[in-house]
Image (cartoon, rainbow, N blue to C red):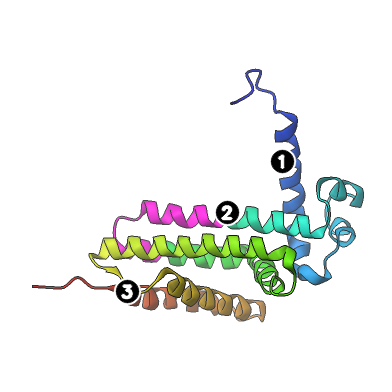
Amino acid sequence: MGNASGRRSPADKYDERRRALAESALKTLGQLGYARASLREIAHNSDFSHGVVHYYFEDKHDLIVYCVREYKTMCVRRYDGVVAGSTTPEELLEGFADQLVLTLEEDAAMHRLWYDVRTQAMFEARLRDVAVEIDGWLEAMMARIVSRYAELAGGQPAMSPPMAYAIFDGMFHQALMNLTLGNDEALDQIRTVVHQLLPTMIEAPVRV
């Protein structure tokens, strides 16, 4: 329920402050990665003091998990918007490719952090739950993209959701690596791959 007086509750203010801190920390986290980051280093490179950061986040694990979960939630909503707004298979292809290029251009640091966290989850038990959770979100998101594309094209998915996700995740990871290494052609390449790859993930309707 909303506040009848229009004032924000203490909980709302607390959540807003955490989000602001997380947004300020993202650049540093994307540059340093999980292992090298510390709350003190994050605070040094943000607009907030170490004491403030530590007040809102218990440790760097707490901050990083919050950042990754919040950002990936937003990502899933963006792609679900493409799925909901597409009325032809070509429109979905273009919208999906556009979002991939946009997020690589604008949010590369966040994606680097996600892949770092997912890798570290093989060694750090505290990261495993969030890594499994987010992988599940992304797999389901990819399944919705493939299913909607198949529906618009009059076919049906030709592979399982885990397989479709693994293929696109590998493609995206490679594009992110190429972009990190300074290969600006990675953006055009991922757009081309999307147009080539997504149609292979559905079975065309049988003509009689």
Select label 3 or label 1 by which is in front. Answer: 3
Among the 4 quarters of the image, the one containing residue 134:
bottom right
Q: Earlier in the sequence, mark 3 or mark 1?
A: 1
Relative to residue 71, is residue 90 drawn left or right?
Answer: left
Relative to residue 59, is residue 155 drawn left or right?
Answer: left
Q: Earlier in the sequence, mark 1 or mark 2?
A: 1
Instruction: Please say if 181 is above or below 115.
Output: below
Amino acid type at circle 1 is: Asp
The chief SS type of the magenta part is: helix
Residue highlighted by disc 3: 158
Among the 4 quarters of the image, the one containing residue 38:
bottom right
The residue shown at (88%, 62%) is: 41
Q: Would you say the residues marked 1 and 2 are in contact, meaning their CB atoms lie under 8 Å apart?
A: no
Q: Which SS class for mark 1? A: helix
Q: Would you say the residues marked 3 and 1 are in contact, meaning their CB atoms lie under 8 Å apart?
A: no
Viewer-closest of 85 and 70: 70
The spot of residue 189 in percent (x, y) is: 49, 79
The residue shown at (47%, 77%) is: 167
Residue highlighted by disc 1: 15
Quadrant, the C terminus: bottom left
How far apart are the alpha carbons under marks 3 and 2? 27 Å
Residue highlighted by disc 2: 73
Mark 3 residue crowding within 10 angstroms, few (<14) / some (14–19) / many (20+): some
Quadrant, the N terminus: top right
- Residue most toward the front? 125
The spot of residue 65 in percent (x, y) is: 71, 58
Which segment is the magenta one?
74-94
